[in-house]
Image (tube, rainbow, N blue to C red):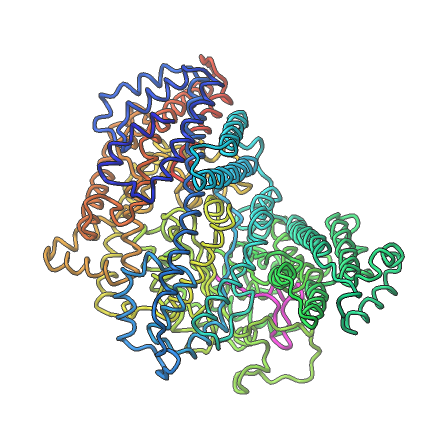
Amino acid sequence: MSSLLESSSSIVEEINIFSTSDLFLRQRLKLVEELWEAVLRAECGQELVDLLKQLRTMCSPEGQLTDITQTPITAVIEQLELNESIRAARAFALYFQLINIVEQHYEQRDQQLTRRANYCDIDSKPANNHGESSTNPSIGHHLVERSWMDSENTSEKGGTFHWLFPHLKELNVPPQQIQRLLDQLDIRLVFTAHPTEIVRHTIRRKQRRIVNILRRLDRAEEAFRGMGLSNSWEAQSAIEQLTEEIRLWWRTDELHQFKPSVLDEVDYALHYFDEVLFEVLPQLSQRLQQSLKSSFPWLRPPKNTFCRFGSWVGGDRDGNPFVTPEVTWKTACYQRNMVLKKYLESIRDLTEILSASLHWSNVSQDLLDSLERDRVQMPEIYDELAIRYRHEPYRLKLAYIEKRLQNTRDRNNRLANPDQRQQLLYREEENIYHSGEEFWQELELIKRNLEETGLNCLELNNLLIQAEMFGFNLTQLDFRQDSSRHADAIEEIAEYLNILPKPYTQLSEAEKTQWLIQELKTRRPLIPTGMQFKKPENSETVETLQMLRYLQQEFGLEICQTYIISMTNYVSDVLEVLLLAKEAGLYDPATSTTTIRIVPLFETVDDLKRAPEVMEDLFKLPLYRASLAGGYDQLQPSETPSQGAVKSLNLPALQPTNLQEIMVGYSDSNKDSGFLSSNWEIHKAQKALQNMAQRYGVDLRLFHGRGGSVGRGGGPAYAAILAQPSSTINGRIKITEQGEVLASKYSLGDLALYNLETVSTAVIQASLLGSGFDDINPWNEIMEDLAERARKAYRGLIYEQPDFLDFFLSVTPIPEISQLQISSRPARRKSGKADLSSLRAIPWVFSWTQSRFLLPAWYGVGTALQSFVDEEPEENLKLLRYFYLKWPFFKMVVSKVEMTLSKVDLQIAHHYVRELSKAEDKERFERVFEEISQEYHRTRDVILNITNHQRLLDSDLSLQRSVQLRNGTIVPLGFLQVALLKRLRQYSNQAQSGVIHFRYSKEELLRGAMLTINGIAAGMRNTG
């Protein structure tokens, strides 16, 4: 809409947001806004367009109202009919979705242009041969200093393989160190089971269609400009199609029509594999190999599977009663079906491509022998196609492969049906693939034959990489359950058997550990056959481990190896799972081998502090160390218990052996102690865990439970990885991805490839070039002090302010968010009273984002930093500025706070307080708001002082532009939301009294409120 862009032009020009390179983006934004306005005018009339202009012009272009009490916007909005409010909310929501698409598309375009420029720049540099002859066994302090001195210059170019390897060569990093790192490179990105995805699947597909139209428009305009023309029919056709797409979108319901099931969530998450990642991941491997070869041609590239995806969707049952063993089984079948479908498409394409004839090309005896075996095993295929492919051996071989894939798919479809499953599981079937490895071997046979005759097929090479990466499972499923569920199940079993002097949960930690170790050493089953559990949830806990074993038997160990324990507090929490695994046949007490990795999740600040002690106590146990190492025979003789001849289950050892995965949670630690304290405790815990694991000779893989928002550990992944303690990465990392993060990173192929490359580059860079600043004790002592100050300030408001909980429940849309149809999981962990301890982190953050406080991501930081500066104003400010320049951890913290503060709007937040507070609460809620307001201004001022910025985000003009583009238009949506929430809550109050005087139903009002929530989430580009 041209008026929106023009209304913000003054502020845009004032802070010079649009550089020359951004003019193209600005032109596209203007075009899309004009089309949006034209569609609204055609669909709803000029009245709606005028209303949107009126609402927008009543607000500051920056989104901040100088005096909210004097603006007429409140009166205008409260006079609107419900259908007018809904149309306005939908229009603004559509606007945000459209500009998000445009920005994302042109971000992808700019990344391609920047990559080409960087290639030219790097390729033009003179070769540096020092790296080839370096024999320095370690990277010296001078190299680290040089690397971080160059950080300002390389930040624009960093994040790509083509930049990284020449940079390592220039810094004389020993090739031996690079090789060791590449050999163990292991990056895992995990789609989580509690998506904050508020956009419907249908809308995502429309977004992708619009991106494709924009690409067509780009190509058309570039073509006619190249010919010196001013316009073309191709460009006009693209614009007309774009208009129709926007019109159809306007007529589509944005809200979910039903609460999604777990299998719906599986579909939401895995469509990124179907649409993007299946094709992109092979390119990532190829890109790394090409870049490595140009700088270090003698080094071996990492295995193709160095970057893999996992999923919690269908496996994470923590707090979600709908994730049952049956749902998990169907999820595995769904995943296999999807990857088989992709393979079948690729085989059909290869059949078209590999047309080589025996008349003109030779084949090896291996292939001919294989075709003969296929003829014997599948004579029907031979009879059908032998004449057609008589002289085309590759096509005939591919026909056999296609038939085996179809048979495998058909069997998989029957496995998803409980009625047919049992007879299929134990019946040997012919002419199917039992594993992805068998499929890969057949493709490799074709490749060898092609190469021996001087042929190369890129499509076949890609399929081989895909078969290696995805196998027949697509992605690995992680299981997760709360620690209390395992204790409850064991308590009921022990009570049934009457084998403990008192209930299990009443034992001390030492007593629990002693008894669990005793039970883990015996081969006697603990659970009697046919035992009927009193509590269904205890039965399900046991059945979950049994289902894990069935999955491994059918799909292979690769389908699920990780079992995460939420809220891990003690050693017994881990041993309980190991004992239940033993009962399911996943742990062999005779050899202490296991086919699952038990991953403790340390979430709260107290748990993070206790984590090193818990893990050390586990590592001291021979049976636990043996389970990591691959059995007792892998330990030193002094650690191995004496045993006679015992019968073993012959469980295979997980690879790699001697690896302990530990998960650290950002969400609950942040809710518990605030942003600064949470990040510092996680930082410290990582270092302590790494040091402790090293003492016991255990390799460590840290699993970062990051959410989409800053308040849950979100933010740019590249900077976040570089800010980790370098000694904790060592080429291995695991990170959660969820909600709108999936859409922003993986909706478009080139954007997905860029994000995967930046993560991979950051892992290599942090492992080889990590700074030593994390180990400077005086700096750590200062951070410890700052974290404690921030924690005290945060908890002083959140947990000690007596009116805060009522304030939160009243002035944010938390009651309405709990009714959003965006997740199968309940908003609270347990039913009961509404308190902060049971509220999940996602709705907690989502609510503060909607009301423009964004409080979890910054509150307490200002008090900590400013009180420190006040003690020695000149010296301490100078020190914090030095931290910001030199210490990646501190810079990451400050940058995230700065970004969050740029999205805060205290004027509209205050409007929520004024309008949604009951009359009897206004005075006490105003006091709470004043505390928040003072801390906001304190935080903003000290952040600007440390960064030496005039405005927030002065160091990231593209992000500053993006935030400013949205802020002004989000304000009217905030006013609309408040008005609708008021009506909805008034309706609820009247309903309780039994007398309702309302023109609209509760469902109509709730729908209106939901639409504003949808729109603000799109505008903020963030939910939880």
- Residue 863: image x %, image y %? 21, 49
Tell me if residue 702 comes above or below residue 317 in the rendering.
below
- Residue 507: image x %, image y %? 50, 63
Tell whether 820 sits left or right of 727: right
Which stretch appears magenta?
A: 579-600
Quarter holding residue 779:
bottom left
Residue furthest to the bottom: 637
Tell me if residue 192 comes above or below residue 297 in the rendering.
above
- Residue 190: image x %, image y %? 51, 55
**Is there any visible trace of residue 795 in the rendered image?**
no
Front residue of 489 and 282: 282
Tell whether 31 sits left or right of 461: left
Name the quadrant of the C terminus.
top left
- Residue 356: image x %, image y %? 74, 62
Tell me if residue 240 comes above or below residue 387 in the rendering.
above
Residue furthest to the front: 228
Tell whether 386 sits left or right of 112: right
Residue at 46% over, 29% down: 1010
Residue at 39% over, 55% down: 604
**Is there any visible trace of residue 105 in the rendered image?**
yes
Q: How many marks?
A: 0
Tell whether 578 sits left or right of 1005: right
Residue 173 within the segment the image draws in magenta: no
Name the quadrant of the N terminus.
top left
Residue 588 within the segment the image draws in magenta: yes
Front residue of 112 and 319: 112
Quarter holding residue 472:
bottom right
Residue at 49% over, 51% down: 750
